[in-house]
Amino acid sequence: MIAASRVTFAYARDDCFPFSKIWKQVNQKTKTPVNAVWFNTTVGCIMLLLIFGGSLAAGAMFSIGAIAAFVAFTTPIFIRVFFVGNRFRPGPWNLGKLSIPVGMIASAFVILMVPILCFPAVVGSNLTAETMNWTCVVYGGPMCMIMIWWAVSARKWFKGPKVNVQHLMLGRDVEGADVLMGQDVSGAETEERGVVVDGKAAEAGKDGGY
């Protein structure tokens, strides 16, 4: 629920959802996207009603969850391995030379597993409309509609996620550096670059000519 509500907030922030103005609101008291949390809570409760549809509906729901997780986690890995390549800027922790091989193995595993999760549990004469695995339709249908929506409309106005925090890349480890904060404490020099940092990170940035 925590992850889903934050994803909903992120998409709503980028105006990708219907009624995005509602879902992207942040509660001023808790500083959390409460509307997005309640939205996902409602959707989750509605999906739980599928258990009354029998084991077929419940099985399809779990398969869809597995496929969606596979696709969501593997998409950035696939793009990094097959499209970005050596242009990728690694973070403080990375797999080094093993990044590409591990990414290829992960992508191959997901490409193998997605069709398997769509296979029915029975075959032959026992396969009927009641025993069929409809995961490919239930998941693939909305995905096809989303791709059509992208081709027809979204690609014309969606310019990528809106960045509300600028990261300060010092290019070296700074001992005791603090995390990015929502307050400007580093002076005009850092402010001009649109970067807001806190504590020793600000001092290191200033000393390094940032």
Image: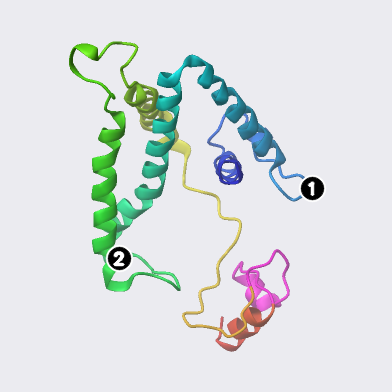
93 over 153 or under it: above or below: below
Kindly state the secondary structure of the residue where label 1 is placed. loop
Predominant SS along the magenta part? loop
Above or below, 133 against 112 in this view is: above
| Residue most extreme to the right | 29
Residue 14 in picture, x, y percent from top left = 55, 42
Q: Which of 91 and 124 is in front in this view?
A: 124
Q: Which residue is drawn at 31% across and 66% down?
A: 87
Q: Residue at x 71, y 40 (%)?
A: 34
**What range is drawn magenta here?**
179-198
Name the spot of residue 137 as percent of width and height, x first: 34, 22
Is 135 or 143 nearer to us in this picture? 135
Q: Which amino acid does label 1 sit on?
A: Gln
- Residue 109: image tag: none
Q: Quadrant of residue 47?
A: top right
Evaluate whether residue 82 shows in this view. Answer: no
Q: Residue furthest bottom?
A: 207
Q: Where is residue 201 in the image (x, y as percent from the top left)?
A: 62, 79
Look at the numbered disc 2 and give the secondary structure of its residue: helix
Q: Which amino acid does label 2 sit on?
A: Ser
- Residue at the spot 55% in from the left edge and 72% down from the top edge: 168
Q: In this view, does 206 lie to the left or right of 137?
A: right
Q: Residues within 10 Å of mark 2 (few under 14, many from 20)?
A: some
Whether residue 85 is in magenta: the answer is no
Which numbered dot is residue 28? Answer: 1
- Residue denoted by label 2: 99
Task: Please report whichever mark, 2 or 1, sits nearer to the chain's N-terminal start.
Answer: 1
> With respect to residue 187, does 155 lie above or below?
above
